[in-house]
Image (tube, grey):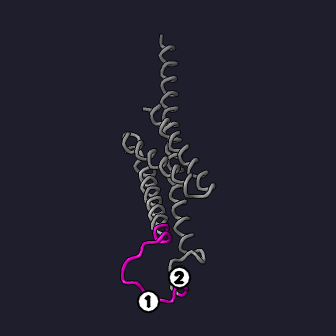
Amino acid sequence: MQQYQHHHSIIEIYFIHCLRMIQIVSQYLWLAGSFIFFLLGYVQLSSFFFIPGNSTHEKNSKREEKENKETNLFYEPSILKSRIGFSLKHSFVSIYFGAMNLILAGGYFFIVKQSYLIMITTLGISLFYFCLSKLYWPIFTRFFLLVANCFFVTASIFLAISR
């Protein structure tokens, strides 16, 4: 009887160890997906400001030289201005989303483990960015967003298993 109880405790310990390893793997997957979002936002933002010919000042000065007329006092929306706003907004949101998830997954992962709302929101935002990338961004961006989505989905499944 004593021997049976000893084996039972070893199985329990092994099971608890496996659950803990699943949680650690899910934390690293969550960190990797978050880092991808942060990095993609940073690359998009820095490429917008630091690639030559991509500056709004250069494009506006070329347009003004071409038109050779007085500056209009009223706001004139253009495709260029809306594209700039679209790109800047999404790169800042991607940086913010990645940074917040990095902070949560790095130091406060117990909150992510306990909150279905954080998991669902993260999955929804990452899926939204992936769908958006199919319309507006190059293929390498789609690939990295697909990888980040796979990381978040796998981490969520692992967290659901380990509860």
> Dot 2 corresponds to which residue?
63
Q: Amino acid at mark 2?
A: Arg
Which residue is the extreme one toward the right? Answer: 140
Q: Residue at x 54, y 59 (%)?
A: 40
Give me the C-alpha separation between circle 1 and circle 2: 12 Å
Q: Residue at x 57, y 69 (%)?
A: 47
Comparing 89 with 77, the one in front is 77
Comparing 78 with 9, the one in front is 78
Say which label, 1 or 2, has the lower sequence index: 2
Please state the extent of the stretch shown in magenta in the rendering. Answer: 65-83
Q: Position of residue 42 (x, y in %)?
A: 52, 64
Q: Amino acid at mark 1?
A: Glu
Per the rendering, the mark at residue 70 is: 1
Circle 2 SS class: helix
Q: Position of residue 22 (x, y in %)?
A: 51, 36
Instruction: Tell me the quarter of the picture where residue 71 sits.
Output: bottom left
Question: From the viewer's perspective, is 81 left or right of 62?
Answer: left
Q: Image height check: is 84 above or below 116?
A: below
